[in-house]
């Protein structure tokens, strides 16, 4: 391959945008099925390991790994509720609670397109008014419902216009920055 083709390849390489994309970063953390199911259970008040294992029929090694990942990411906190024997429960942090709208959006989509002939398996009741509710996205300024037809994506302050410096971690897993940065 000649040096002349490198600028064209570089110009077409937009993979750096994925590293700066909030959806991609969030999915790398919570985009796996069991992780979302654990979060759903946590939103519905399930906190204990045994209850999660039973409700989800999830293999225990998988549950342990996913819970550790959620704790390490700051979405759940592990809190001791018994000392004899020592037992812990998993409580949503603020960052975890902030994922509620995303889980409800998936639930609504599943209810609309995947529910059986009898309708959705779970409905949400708004405790304040007592009615079954169908949450939706609204503009935080004017209150209008938003959807794909009335929003426009624009560059935000964290938008990446060019690739981040390549690191040795890309090849070896270390944290050494190659393109003029510092090493760690």
Image (cartoon, rainbow, N blue to C red):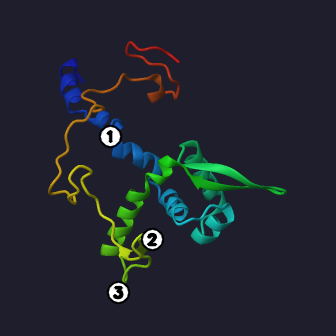
Return the residue nearer the eye: 90 or 50: 90
Task: Determine whether, in the image, residue 41 is placed left or right of residue 7.
Answer: right
What's the CA distance linking mark 1 and mark 2? 35 Å
Q: Quadrant of the N terminus?
A: top left
Task: Determine whether, in the image, residue 117 is placed left or right of residue 9.
Answer: right
Q: Position of residue 121 (x, y in %)?
A: 43, 79
Q: Within 10 angstroms of label 2, few (less than 14), some, or many (20 or more) residues?
A: few
Pointer 3 with pointer 1, Cβ within 8 A:
no
User: Residue at horizontal 49%, vertical 19%?
Assistant: 176
Q: Nearer the viewer, mark 1 or mark 2?
A: 2
- Above or below — where is 173 with respect to 47? above
According to the picture, the residue beneath numbered tag 3 turns out to be 117
The kind of secondary structure element at disc 2 is loop
According to the picture, the residue beneath numbered tag 1 turns out to be 21
- Above or below — where is 67 with respect to 2? below
User: Residue at horizontal 48%, vertical 47%?
Assistant: 95
Residue 127 got which mark? 2
What's the CA distance linking mark 3 and mark 2? 27 Å
Q: Quadrant of residue 128?
A: bottom left
The kind of secondary structure element at disc 3 is loop
Task: Determine whether, in the image, residue 174 is placed left or right of residue 131.
Answer: right
Considering every residue shown, the one lying at the far front of the view is: 128
Q: Position of residue 171 (x, y in %)?
A: 46, 28
Considering every residue shown, the one lying at the far right of the view is: 84
Q: Within 10 angstroms of label 1, few (less than 14), some, or many (20 or more) residues?
A: few
Pointer 3 with pointer 2, Cβ within 8 A:
no
């Amino acid at each position: 391959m000649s040096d002349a083709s490198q600028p064209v390849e570089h110009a077409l390489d937009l993979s750096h945008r994925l590293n700066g994309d909030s959806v991609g970063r969030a999915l790398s953390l919570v985009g796996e099925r069991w992780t979302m199911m654990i979060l759903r259970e946590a939103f519905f008040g399930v906190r204990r390991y045994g209850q999660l294992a039973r409700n989800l029929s999830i293999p225990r090694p998988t549950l342990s790994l996913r819970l550790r990942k959620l704790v390490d990411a700051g979405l759940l906190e592990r809190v001791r509720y018994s000392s004899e024997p020592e037992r812990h429960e998993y409580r949503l942090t603020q960052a975890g609670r902030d994922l509620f709208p995303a889980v409800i959006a998936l639930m609504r989509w599943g209810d609309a397109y995947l529910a059986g002939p009898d309708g959705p398996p779970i409905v949400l009741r708004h405790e304040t008014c007592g009615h079954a509710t169908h949450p939706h996205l609204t503009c935080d300024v004017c209150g209008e419902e938003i959807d794909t037809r009335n929003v426009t994506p624009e560059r935000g302050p964290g938008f990446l216009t060019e690739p981040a410096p390549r690191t040795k971690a890309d090849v070896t897993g270390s944290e050494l920055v190659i393109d003029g940065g510092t090493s760690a």
